[in-house]
Image (cartoon, rainbow, N blue to C red):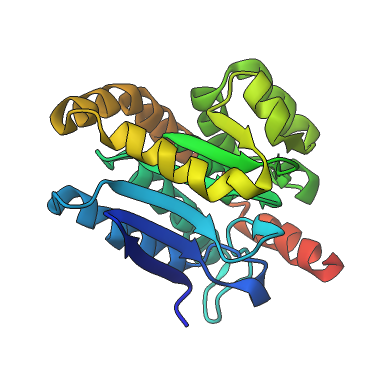
Amino acid sequence: MPDLIATETDGILWLSINRPAKASSISRAVTDAYAEALASLHEREDLKGAIWTSASATLFSGGVDLKRPEGLDDQQASEYRTAIITDLLMATLTCPRPIVTMTQGRMIGGAFLNALVCDRIVAAEGAVFQLPEVRIGMGSPIAAAVVEGATHAGLAYDLLLSAREIPAERLEEMGGPCTTVPQDALAARAVETLESLAAMPREAFGYMKRWFQAPRIEALEHAIRFTAETRRGRNSEVTGLVEKFFEKT
């Protein structure tokens, strides 16, 4: 089975992470399939938009797959992991059609970042989000840029420095792009949300998305450059922190 399953129903593209044995982590294959699927939204008039979800009912995703690919040195491994998440985010940020995240259970790291740059998160009651990078021993300017762009600087500061979980209900209360619903209403609300956005005039909707996403893209690119500059010469240290983390899990 592919790492990301893409299906179409009534003009909606459903994109489901399918890596239950790997904590539903985001692999290179997930990112590539996701980006390819979103590209079809540019081309096909019959598609309304996409709903991003996961095959797991308890763990949407454990974030980017941090395990080191065979044959890569420290520098290459660091760049490889960064590219997985930045390519995923850029595919979402540059898509002119609506994208809704439908989630339940826990969503961690890069998966939460991508959800935040979608047009809406529809979450089941009890869903939680977390950015644990600082707890692992890694800072993430990229995560800070995304959270600040989707919410506000105070929440980004809190979540990135405390690594605490935030319930979907709390994210919604704080003005985050999240709607919390009972579990049995999750799929219906995700579809309803997507269709309400897709009903907007296509050209005007895409035009306004480009306007809103432009500063987010600029902030993301700045964070990528800052990360590359400040981690230069420290890739072996970062790789060591990642490997130590996986020894404990």
Q: Please, is residue 244 above or below residue 207 in the view? A: below
Q: Is residue 191 left or right of residue 74?
A: left
- Residue 41 seen: yes
Q: Is residue 71 left or right of residue 51?
A: right
Q: Please, is residue 28 above or below residue 101 in the view? A: below
Quick one: quadrant of the C terminus?
Answer: bottom right
The residue drawn where x is 50% and y is 46% is 188
Which quarter of the figure has residue 93? top left
Which quarter of the figure has residue 26? bottom right
- Residue 228 seen: no
Q: Is residue 181 left or right of residue 16?
A: right
Coordinates of residue 1 in the picture (x, y in percent): 47, 83
Coordinates of residue 124 in the picture (x, y in percent): 66, 44
Coordinates of residue 222 in the picture (x, y in percent): 42, 31
The residue drawn where x is 27% and y is 22% is 211
The residue drawn where x is 79% and y is 61% is 245
Coordinates of residue 179 in the picture (x, y in percent): 57, 31
The residue drawn where x is 58% and y is 18% is 152
Q: Nearer the viewer, residue 212 or 238?
A: 212
Which quarter of the figure has residue 64? bottom right
Q: Nearer the viewer, residue 150 or 246?
A: 150
Q: Please, is residue 218 above or below residue 236 in the view? A: above
Residue reaching furthest to the right: 248
Q: Is residue 201 left or right of residue 227?
A: left
Q: How many marks?
A: 0
Q: Nearer the viewer, residue 159 or 71?
A: 159
Q: Please, is residue 209 above or below residue 184 in the view? A: above
